[in-house]
Image: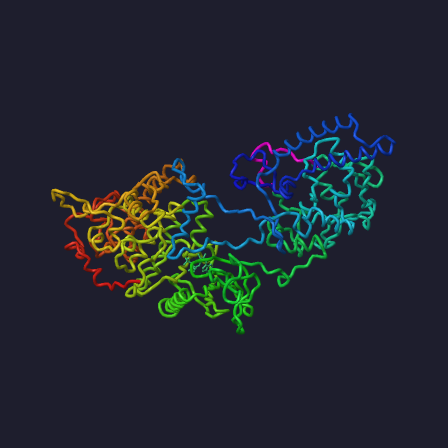
Amino acid sequence: MQRSDNKDYNGESDSQNKPDLWNPLFMGEEGVSLPRQDLQVQVEEQQRELAQRGQPVQQNERMQQSQQKQQQQQVQFQLQDQQYKPQVKFNFVNPWGGNGEHTDAAIPLDNVIEEGLPQPRDSVSSEAFRRRKSSLIIPPARAPGPNPFEYDDVNQHPNIYNAQQPQQQLKQRSVFVPNQHNQQSQQRLNSLRFVPSSLYTGQDPHRRQSVAVVNYPTTNNTTNTITNNAKTKPLVMSTGNPGAYPYRRLSAYPPSTSPTTSLQPPYKQLRRDGNVQVQSSSVATQIIIPQMRKCRSRSELSPNLNPIPQYRRASLNSKTISPLIALTKSLITTYSLCSPEFSYQTSKNPKRVLTKPNEAKYNNGYDNINSDYILYVNDILGTEQNRKYLVLDILGQGTFGQVVKCQNVISREMVAVKVVKSRAEYLNQSITEAKILELLNTKVDPLNEHHFLRLHDTFVHKNHLCLVFELLSKNLYELLKQNQFHGLTIHLIRSFTTQLLDSLSVLKDSKLVHCDLKPENILLCCPDKPDLKIVDFGSSCEERRTVYTYIQSRFYRAPEVILGIPYSTSIDMWSLGCIVAELFLGIPIFPGSSEFNQLTRIVKCLGYPPTWMMEMGKNTTKFLKKTDYGDGTATNDSKKYRIKTEDEFNEEYNTNEQPSKQYFKWTTLPEVIKHYRLSKKIKGNPILIEQEMRDRDCLTHFLAGILNINPLERWTPQQAAMHPFITQQPFTGEWYPPGSLHGLSSSAGESTSGIPKRPKNIRHPSLQEGTAREFNKLRIVED
Ligand SMILES: Nc1ncnc2c1ncn2[C@@H]1O[C@H](COP(=O)(O)OP(=O)(O)OP(=O)(O)O)[C@@H](O)[C@H]1O
């Protein structure tokens, strides 16, 4: 099977020189340089021969010349060989331990930005770009769970891929190891022609090609032996005596399904390649090992699928399985087939530490410096019967603690356990989270219809509160990342938004504010369906108890929170607007590097907040400046304020604010949405493009209603759920939520958003007098 996509080769698009998946080059250590070893061996051999002939061993001039020539030749070979080598380092991780390097498979952020846009791609900016720094309390960097299938140093592996040790083991068991048993003949072969250097570097190409190929037929007129007639001839094989046949018979094929022809793979395959000469019982024929060849066209890279892929690989129940399955899901079976001594028991695995940092500091050595419980794979959390959970892997690390994938030891149910930090402040907040979830699960949504995470159990383990949740799949941030930070389809966005609006409607009715809605806290229920759930109610509160003023992750923080005005459930709608825009654009719409920068970005895109908000905000003077009109002619209240320049802000607060990095060419919301690049699928199809543009207009209108800077005009979830973007009714360009006079005037000031303003004669009662009467009713509680 050959690769059909080329994306993983360091982003290089040229597929011409890419080796296929089974190329031994993929399996070896990068930089394997057998030719050098070969050269040495050859020189030693020459020396030995000279010595045998009674000539002095010292290198005379001729020998030196010939060595130089050979060296030049080898350098040439290596250069040629480099063309075949992938640039990616494929390391095989030893699932039993070992501390090889891990190649980071994370998708580079370089793919995120549209073509032609400024590229904020230096490491610092991409770090800052991650919104994970924007939480209430800066959380440690997300620590994805180590992948047990990552590739590590080949030599670390205790099994068949080990370049040295297994060969010795295999040799003891009389297993055919071509690269070792015919080392000498190989040297001679190399001297005859060019063979890619790594073809024989500690790898058994046949073994890699298939575990099943080692099952060979026995026929009466053949003798299954390999003649290692290295001194005189290249590798020569003969077939015949089954007992002496160097390949082990594996249980993968029951006798009835055993191949019956006399020439079976790999011989058959080698022969097909035209490079094999087989010696039967009477006539000896040479086998020439196949060489790598250059891929000439793209079509050669497409997989070569056999309807019945005989003799390629097998599972224990004799079924043919794909190489991918053989090397992932069925890896243990594959190992078992390769080596009868191989045994695997999870309980014997060394405990892999999941927590970072993992140095013991507090809580009798159970906790690290952040008061996080140091978790190991195979740890048991909980002590009570039926409340014991086997730790399997880490799912996420956040402000409040770590979330780990666990299995209930008795019921075997898979769950997610949040192990809260052992500090009082986190403990108290997590108790609130548990209470809110309990309320949602039992009273508000007992039938599990409104997309809230289910809490199964709570217990305390070594001074850590543990919350046992249903196990969900990846979060929306991970989904975007997986999509290389390209936006999702409008269809999918609609599906997600509909579900989220349903949840927010229920929360609003229950007077609950989530306070930390962001893509990381919205999880898919399973990987292959668009069903989702909202998690992390750790910052949630009742609407009448909005205790904290420093809430929400920065990118999703509502303007009223930034300005320091009392808030309500409408801040979740703001976050939702930011999330929907991000799902479309692939990257956050307001990726503020600081609160000041966040507000600047919002104002640039959507215009100034209404004056009453600025008058009322506790933080207004921090970020905005009152303008002096001198002659007093200014009538427009909004012009009383302008956002401070970076210099003014830096001077005042001794900071180092930089001008906002532009992630999009366009500034206003309608422009950003309209000009976002078209997906390849619809490019060139005018009908689809027209449909897409209509959808975008509708999406823009929908977003403008949710991303209304004025929280009193911002649509409620119930209102938003009636918008044509959600209902898919025809969108005429104008829409007002039924029973409301709220239009789309996003601010009382100059609208830079490009969204049409509500007609002047229509005013919402709460805006009369320009005061914040509604807000005054809310209780302001300082934190
Ligand atoms: N039930 C679950 N199933 C699978 N993964 C989960 C589950 N709950 C949480 N996660 C993962 O763990 C991550 C952190 O969870 P959570 O947000 O609850 O922790 P936190 O400490 O409150 O984080 P934050 O810093 O956002 O406050 C999530 O982003 C998600 O990827």
Whether residue 622 is situated above or below residue 283 in the rendered picture: below
Quadrant for residue 97, please give it: bottom right
Q: Position of residue 600 (x, y in %)?
A: 29, 46
* Side (left or right) of 645 relative to 48: left
Viewer-proximal residue among 427 and 265: 427
* Range shown magenta: 290-304
Q: Split into 4 quadrants, where in the image is the N terminus?
A: top right
Q: Residue at x 78, y 25 (%)?
A: 62
Q: Position of residue 297 (x, y in %)?
A: 57, 32
* Side (left or right) of 265 relative to 615: right
Viewer-proximal residue among 664 and 374: 374
- Label tally: 0
Q: Position of residue 584 (x, y in %)?
A: 37, 46
Quadrant location, ligand no. 1: bottom left
Q: Is residue 291 magenta?
A: yes
Quadrant for residue 576, please give it: bottom left
Whether residue 456 is situated above or below residue 331 in the rendered picture: below
Q: Residue at x 69, y 41 (%)?
A: 201
Q: Position of residue 177 (x, y in %)?
A: 74, 45
Is the stretch drawn in magenta largely helix, strand or loop? loop
Viewer-proximal residue among 101 and 704: 101
Residue at the far bottom in the pictured view? 385
Q: Split into 4 quadrants, where in the image is the C terminus?
A: bottom left
